[in-house]
Amino acid sequence: MKLLIVEDEVDFATLLKQRLTRKKINIDLAHTIEQALDWLGKVSYDVILLDQRLPDGEGLSLLTHVKEADPFVEVVVLTGHGSLETAIQSIKQGAYDYLTKPCNTTKLEFTLTQAYEKKRLAEQAAGLSEALRRQTGSEPIIGQSSEIKGLMQMVEKVKDSEATILVLGESGSGKELIARSLHFWSARKDKPFQALNCAALPNQLVESELFGHEKGAFTGAAGVKMGLIEIADGGTLFLDEIAEMDLDIQAKLLRLLEYGEYFRVGATRSRKVKLRVVAATNKRLEQEVAAGRFREDLYHRLNVVQIEVPPLRNRKADIPLLADYLLAQKCPQNNPKVLSPEALEVLLSYDFPGNVRELANILERGCLLSYGPTIEAEHLFQPQMGKRTPVSKKGLEEEAPRWGDTDLSLENCERQHILRVLKMAGENKTKAAQELKIGLKTLYRKVKEYGIEPLP
């Protein structure tokens, strides 16, 4: 880890450097904003430990500069005499966390390590896209959840099989991504990959696109046209929304799967091909068969190997990595952006009926509506998508700390403030976190840190 400590108390900064260097952390010291800017112009850091107040200005002004220059750098703010409001403001401006001085060394090491890990994962996700696209021609499957690991293991097992594969999943869950991975991770990767959405075209055009046609086969057929089956020979044919295919076309597709041959529209001579077919649908084909909308023999021919893509709501642990990856795609390279802790918590609490496609659209909206390097929660959702209910502030104002109280330390004020907000929120931690303008994970950490018991 490469760490920059920006702290005006020279002895304290030196002591921190001595203790942290033992943990094999590479550290530079700066005692003013000017010195910090000088270091930042020469060295790329993973984490910055930043004092809130410095001789030549507020540390938070440097925080803004740092996040604009490199949104992946994580900043931990140190505060000794600041208010709770200022400390929370630092998190809103993009800080990973804040600690009060004098801080516990073990806690400091843990916070810095967690910040570094977050930065490393974000950079990994951002760099993964281009690297894998160059190597395989396909977008990566992003995620570390057990659901995604199982999905990738299944893809790895069947990628080189000749068997027809049926990919099931809700709209927007990434079925075409799985089809492309099956192709580009396999020995066929240098062969053609052709895709057809069966729901996007009228039946006559679907037949022509798929099988091709001879000159004069129908009105407007001015010449011979190669179909996607012919173009994909030796490679992979992906048929999306297969349940929408007309029954007559299904019969012709069945012949292709059984005998490896097909007829162009208007042709009298069959053609031979050797390819692998991957079909996808967001419907249960057995129900379509029962309703008479899908051929039973074709269903059994397609359903040799079945892969089910989990909906995003069942793998929410992947949302942070997905968000980092998608933001790297959606935001211009000269204007990279990251999510605030509150924005991430809002995403984690949402069920995404439109799955990864909806997440991508929401993040693109955030890129467009946010002006600085950080995307806030209010940049993500349209008003009709749900409003957060604030807790009442009357009780908070009545119980605010006053001069002369026995303990006005920032730590105690923070503990008491969290207790009051939890009480006013009826112990609803999501509402309390929203009112405190911190992430839900941060609130849970604070509750544990301060030993806050369930309210009576």
Image (tube, rainbow, N blue to C red):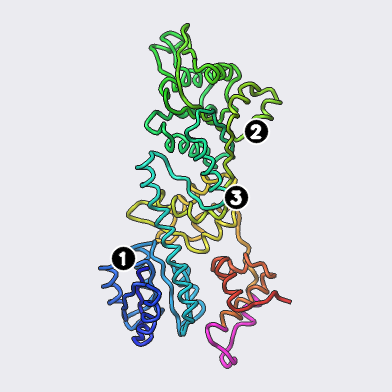
Q: Does the segment drawn in magenta span residue 230?
A: no
Q: Earlier in the sequence, mark 2 or mark 3?
A: 2
Region rendered in magenta: 394-412
Residue 287 horizontal side relative to residue 183, left or right: right
> Which residue occupies 63% across, 33% down?
283
Q: Does the segment drawn in magenta span residue 406?
A: yes
Mark sitting on residue 313: 3
Q: Position of residue 164 (x, y in %)?
A: 54, 28
Residue 242 horizontal side relative to residue 293, left or right: left
Quadrant of the drawing holding the C terminus: bottom right
Residue bearing mark 1: 44
Quadrant of the drawing holding the N terminus: bottom left
* Amino acid bearing label 1: Ser
Residue bearing mark 2: 284
Other residues around mark 1 within 10 Å, as few (<14) / some (14–19) / many (≥20): few
* Amino acid bearing label 2: Arg
Residue sitting nearer the eye, 399 or 160: 160
